[in-house]
Amino acid sequence: QVQLVESGGGLVQPGGSLRLSCAASGFTSDYWDIGWFRQAPGKEREGVSCISNRSGRTYYADSVKGRFTVSKDNAKNTVYLQMNSLKPEDTAVYYCAASASGITPGRRFRPDEYTYWGQGTQVTVSS
């Protein structure tokens, strides 16, 4: 059973930085993708970034491109989301999600492509 545990959320001022972690366990192969999503109150869940373990390729939504960086540490089975130049509109609950069956190209930011989800961590950007 795949399990994902996020950490690293908190309160930060506009322009500040946070690093989120997603500790993963239970994968039975190295063919997996991890996505980062966020959901603000009253809004739909939005994909912001994802990483493929096999290829190492990374993907970003336009809203975070140039500010967020996703990376992985296979030795620690952990995926990170480094968030810089944070804006109030980045405020949301952030989730990591995993797929062990491959992601259809063009659908990387669709929540229904991912099977496993973490519990979420709150990120609040406010002065």
Image (spheres, rainbow, N blue to C red):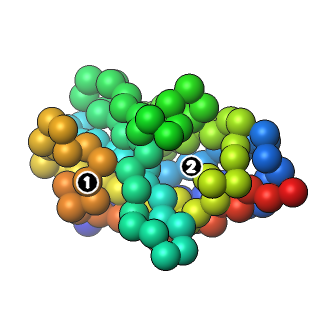
Residue drawn 26% across and 23% down? Answer: 55
Q: Position of residue 84 (x, y in %)?
A: 68, 36
Q: Position of residue 80 (x, y in %)?
A: 53, 41
Q: Position of residue 64 (x, y in %)?
A: 53, 38
At mark 2, the secondary structure is: strand
Residue drawn 58% across and 63% down? Answer: 92
- The vertical placement of 74 against 6, above or below, is above
Which label's residue is closer to the chain start, 2 or 1? Answer: 2
Mark yes or no: residue 112 visible. yes
* Mark 2 lies on residue: 21
For residue 14, which numbered disc appears in the image? none
Assess disc 1: are there few (<14), some (14-19) or many (≥20) residues with their C-alpha within 10 Å of its C-alpha.
Answer: some
Q: Quadrant of residue 51?
A: top left
At mark 1, the secondary structure is: loop
Quadrant for the C terminus in the image: bottom right
Q: Quadrant of residue 67?
A: top right
Mark yes or no: residue 24 visible. no
Q: Position of residue 71 (x, y in %)?
A: 49, 32
- Choose mark 2 or mark 1, whichever is in front: 1
Q: Identify which residue, 29 or 53, lies in the foreground.
A: 53
Q: Amino acid at mark 2?
A: Ser
Q: Is residue 94 left or right of residue 12?
A: left
- The vertical placement of 39 against 18, above or below, is below
Q: Identify which residue, 15 or 53, lies in the foreground.
A: 15
* Mark 1 lies on residue: 110
Residue drawn 61% across and 52% down? Answer: 90
Measure how far apart labels 2 and 1 are at the Cα level: 21 Å
